[in-house]
Amino acid sequence: MSDLGFKAHDHSDCVNSAISAAEARCAAFDLRLTPVRRRVLELLLAEHRALGAYDILAQLSAEGLGAQPPIAYRALDFLVKAGFAHRIEALNAYIACTHLGADHTPAFLICRSCQSVAESDTAMTQGRLGDAARAAGFHIEHTVVEAQGLCPACQAQDAAS
Amino acid sequence: MSDLGFKAHDHSDCVNSAISAAEARCAAFDLRLTPVRRRVLELLLAEHRALGAYDILAQLSAEGLGAQPPIAYRALDFLVKAGFAHRIEALNAYIACTHLGADHTPAFLICRSCQSVAESDTAMTQGRLGDAARAAGFHIEHTVVEAQGLCPACQAQDAAS
DNA sequence: TCCGGTGTTGATATGTTATAACATACACTA
DNA sequence: TAGTGTATGTTATAACATATCAACACCGGA
């Protein structure tokens, strides 16, 4: 489990390495990290929390990179398909992937107080959900695993107040 | 695991018993199963698949029970809070609970072909997700566990075609 | 060089899901 | 019968997402 979202760390470093990794992956798989896509990825990487498509769009618009919803959605779709970002269903929002490169089945811990999100890469399909699916004869293609609650910092703050 | 959603069964029986259980629970906890709420629950129970709020609303409207979005959303909120229904985040839709009475942490198997949904009551918090959360010091309040794929019937159909 | 295919972007419009805000009705009870 | 709380009715709008078509860039082959 990576709880990067909840920990202090060298953030500019973590952004830079993620962008580099994305560039490498695009080169390897013949994908194009165009200016809009790259900027959207940067915006997502800038925070360890989920951003709505319209948050992204507002920023793009302010920077003259496009002002219509499809601009943002297309870039986000690309990033999600390429594995550079994930969609958080419970929030209708998007977050940069923190396990770039690995093909994974992500699970998320979402703080309801500070909105920060941590990504896990545990293979849920191998756990109880997988057992249940096998018992039912169900073939899993994709899983959504999102836990909502309080991160360590917000629990402390809660207790203090 | 209950895979009721994927199995033949006496459906009118399963609807009736669910309504009875809901009535009993309302009586016990001093909740009110008003006409609109009851009708929405019936609509959800009528199918083992998720219905959007606007599907519900269209039906209510046709029956003269209210035509504005808040009517449907309020009834759905009540049913979800009371534990009579669940929201499927991945579909932005709602489904009747098939484990009424038990306080549970549901997980869902969603067929992308026939849209049927089966509900499990495995306690995911005790599985890998729970381990990950404990390791991160995260306090889980609510979990969303939804697997998308193909149900047994649709797999068979797929293979045949 | 031209051409056609593919992929990306630009732009308008629309569709879908969800909530805010405020008013009214109804039931219980003091 | 006035007061309180819960539920409902209504309008408007916020927030999220996609369909469609036009324009343009890039690349490989004729």
Image (cartoon, coloured by chain):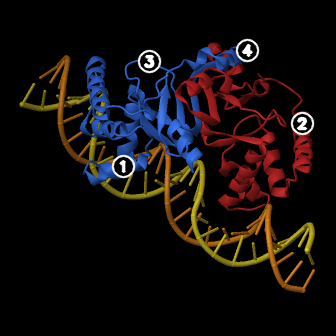
Chain colours: A blue, B red, C yellow, D orange
Marks 4 & 2 on one chain:
no
Marks 2 & 1 on one chain:
no
Mark 3 lies on residue: A103
Q: Position of residue A47 (x, y in %)?
A: 38, 40
Q: Are marks 2 and 1 in contact (CB under 8 Å)?
A: no
Q: Are marks 3 and 1 in contact (CB under 8 Å)?
A: no
Residue A115 lies, with reference to residue A77, above or below; the image says below
Mark 2 lies on residue: B12
**What amino acid does circle 4 point to?**
Ala
Q: Position of residue A139 (x, y in %)?
A: 63, 17
Mark 4 lies on residue: A135
Q: Are marks 4 and 2 in contact (CB under 8 Å)?
A: no
Q: Is residue B99 left or right of residue C20?
A: right
Give the Cα distance between marks 3 and 1: 28 Å
Give the Cα distance between marks 3 and 4: 25 Å
**What amino acid does circle 2 point to?**
Ser
* Numbered circles on residues, count: 4
Mark 1 lies on residue: A57
Give the Cα distance between marks 4 and 1: 43 Å
- Please give the chain letter of the residue carrying mark 3: A
Secondary structure of residue under mark 3? loop
First in sequence: mark 3 vs mark 1: 1
Q: Nearer the viewer, residue C13 or A91?
A: A91
Secondary structure of residue under mark 4? helix
Secondary structure of residue under mark 1? helix
First in sequence: mark 4 vs mark 1: 1
Q: What is the crowding at mark 4: few (fewer than 14 residues within 10 Å), some, or many (at least 20)?
A: few
Q: Position of residue B148 (x, y in %)?
A: 61, 26
The quadrant in which residue A48 appears is top left
Give the Cα distance between marks 2 and 1: 48 Å
